[in-house]
Image (cartoon, rainbow, N blue to C red):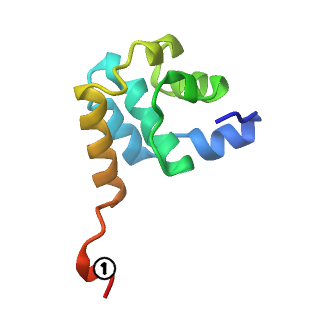
Amino acid sequence: MDWNWNRQELAEHWSLRFEELARTEAKSEPLRLGFAAQLKFYQLAGRFPASAEEIPDAAGRYLGDQLGRSVTELFDYDWSGRNGQRHRAEILGFLGVRALEPHDLA
């Protein structure tokens, strides 16, 4: 995503709501920022980011400020590994996203 964000847009699209913050803070500290970035990115783009490079700089800093974490932690997050995969599954469940089933088509 190559977006330029002003403060109002950052607040509107990248602020963690209470329930999102609670879920994020339940993660170990080094994983919080990556989890939050995946969550907010998915809500905006309808897909998960493949790496930290897809998170806009301003958005990464904004999320980091909310969590008291350094934006550099995004580059240490295991986007495609076990934690990243587990976080994606949790995010989909949290958002109520599920696979299409045959009865959905009827």
Q: Which residue is mark 1?
A: 104
Mark 1 surroundings: few (<14), some (14-19) or many (≥20) residues within 10 A: few
Residue 35 visible? The answer is: yes
Say above or below: 2 vs 72.
below
Give residue 91's position: percent from left, percent from top. Answer: 33, 46
Which quadrant of the rendered structure holds the N terminus?
Answer: top right
Q: Residue at x 50, y 41 (%)?
A: 40
Nearer to the camera, 26 or 31: 31
Is 92 on the left or on the right of 68, as rendered? left
Q: Residue at x 35, y 34 (%)?
A: 24
Is 36 on the left or on the right of 96, as rendered? right
Q: Residue at x 56, y 29 (%)?
A: 54
Give residue 88's position: percent from left, percent from top. Answer: 32, 41
Give residue 5's position: percent from left, percent from top. Answer: 73, 35
Q: Residue at x 55, y 40 (%)?
A: 15
Say above or below: 91 vs 99.
above
Give residue 77's position: percent from left, percent from top. Answer: 37, 19
Residue 69 visible? The answer is: no
Tell me where residue 81 sits by quadrant. top left
Nearer to the camera, 96 or 52: 52
Residue sticking out furthest to the bottom: 106
Secondary structure type for disc 1: helix
The residue type indicated by label 1 comes to Asp
**How many numbered marks does the figure carry?**
1
Say above or below: 104 vs 27.
below
Which quadrant of the rendered structure holds the C terminus?
Answer: bottom left
Is 106 on the left or on the right of 15, as rendered? left
Nearer to the camera, 50 or 15: 50
Tell me where residue 21 sits by quadrant. top left
